[in-house]
Image (cartoon, helix red, strand yellow):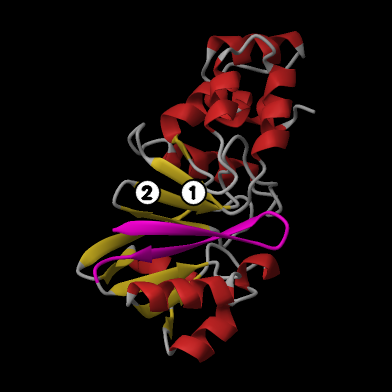
Amino acid sequence: MKIRQFRYSADNLGYVLFGRTQALAIDGGAVEKIMTFTKKKGLSLKFVTNTHGHPDHTAGTRELLDRSGAVYLDHRKVCQEGGFELDQERIAVIHTPGHTDDSVSFFAGGVLITGDTLFNGTVGNCFSGDLYGFFCSIKALLRFPGDTMVYAGHDYVKASMAFARSVEPDNADIDGYLDRYDPHHVRSTLADELRVNPYLRFNEAPLIDVLKGKGAAVITEYDRWKGVMALE
């Protein structure tokens, strides 16, 4: 399974996952670019779906369906089924609530498409109000191998790394992370994220020291997660 990233609006990122002949669009706001790409590659756009229901992620769904004849996959339903097949390859769909109650992530071929749950360098806002559910979602994503490639729903890398540096000014990995940043192909590995993303580093001694310095509880993982989420 291969992936192609499409930037649209100010910082949104949408995707096409594709095999030999079939393709899937996820958060397909870049309608024209997606249609051009699939035509050029000789791909049949079989499915269109979303990571969650926010309008900036669903904006292109109807037009893609109308223009391609693709089948709409309700992300909530395919999540209940655990996934689906594309070009005889399995695409896993994982319920990752927190940003919204309906948020899902997609995994195929070593690639994790996380929408607004996990960004490259940060995490999404907890609009659902379910902070514990968000914590469980992050823990679920961290079970994937360290070389898993993370593809998110927005490009917030520069602002995220500025925040990460304010939290851990001595973290030498941030410079390398920024050196590898490519605005034309935004991605990182889970191992990269564990080195620089404050919201994934709640078990790391330097981050725990930061939380202690702010008087936050650090006894449990969830205590530490809440402490990191409260950082400003």
Crowding at dot 2, Cα within 10 Å, few <14 / some 14-19 / many 20+, comes out as many
Task: Tell me the SS state at disc 2.
Answer: strand
What residue is shown with label 2? 111
On screen, residue 41 above or below 232: below
Task: Tell me the SS state at disc 1.
Answer: strand
Q: Position of residue 131 (x, y in %)?
A: 64, 42
- Main SS class of the magenta portion in the image: strand
225 left or right, relative to 20: right
Observer able to see residue 74: no
> Looking at the image, which residue is at 73% across and 27% down?
162
What residue is shown with label 1? 151
Report the magenta residues as a range: 1-20
Of 2 and 129, nearer the camera is: 2
Residue type, label 2: Val
| Dot 1 or dot 2, earlier in sequence | 2
> Looking at the image, which residue is at 35% across and 34% down?
147
On screen, residue 219 above or below 106: above
Of 15 and 200, nearer the camera is: 15
Crowding at dot 1, Cα within 10 Å, few <14 / some 14-19 / many 20+, comes out as many
Q: Position of residue 184 (x, y in %)?
A: 56, 49
